[in-house]
Image: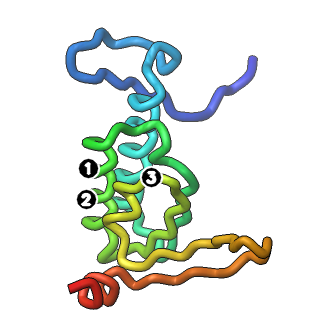
Amino acid sequence: MSNVVGIEIKATPPGKKLSSIQSLSGGERSLTSIALLCSLLTCFPSPFVVLDEVDAALDDANTIRFGQILGTLSDQTQFLTITHNRETMAQANILYGVTMGDDGVSKLLSVKLEQAKAFAK
């Protein structure tokens, strides 16, 4: 007899019947994973968390909510978020990136958004 250890997650998005994770859309799966991660971070804060493209399947409204949740948790945890999502980047404090010029040479880019907003005015 084998002992199976783990957790079972049941997610019921509004307007849907309770079902397996396979029947959820990509965005619903992402939101379920993000909710689990954020609930764990609320109970057991970590000083540093790296998130890689966790917002890729989210629509704009849920990406904004995702950024607000990270903002709420950022008083206890520093987040490094790897993303291509404009909404997520718009909510960041600092952006780091790599760009390539016509000469084919990669250059590192660092932008503090508060300073950029002040400069733009």
Marked residue nearer the N-terminal end (1 or 3): 1
Q: Which residue is mark 2?
A: 68
Q: Amino acid at mark 3?
A: Asn
The residue drawn where x is 33% and y is 72% is 74
* Outermost residue, front side: 102
Image quadrant occupied by the N terminus: top right
Which amino acid lies under the numbered mark 1 shown in the image of this protein? Arg
Q: Are marks 3 and 2 in contact (CB under 8 Å)?
A: no
- Alpha-carbon neighbours of circle 2 within 10 Å: few (<14), some, or many (≥20)? some
Please report contact status of discs 2 and 1: CB closer than 8 Å, yes or no.
yes
Residue under the point 40% across and 12% down: 19
Q: Is 57 placed above or below 68 here?
A: above
Helix, strand or loop for disc 3? loop
- Real-space Cα separation, disc 3 to disc 2, in angstroms: 14 Å
- Horizontally, residue 104 falls left or right of residue 57, namely right
User: Which numbered disc flags the more N-terminal residue, 3 or 2?
Assistant: 2
Return the residue at label 1: 65
Quadrant showing the C terminus: bottom left
Q: CA distance from mark 1 to mark 3?
A: 13 Å
The secondary element bearing badge 2 is classed as helix
Q: Is residue 109 above or below residue 32?
A: below
At x 24%, y 89%, the residue is 118
| Residue that mark 3 sits on | 85
> Depth-wise, is mark 1 or mark 3 nearer the camera?
3
The residue lying toward the viewer, choosing from 29 and 12, is: 29
Using the image, tell me which numbered label, if any, was put on residue 47.
Answer: none
Q: Please name the amino acid that badge 2 sits on.
A: Gln
**Do the residues under discs 1 and 3 have CB atoms within 8 angstroms?**
no
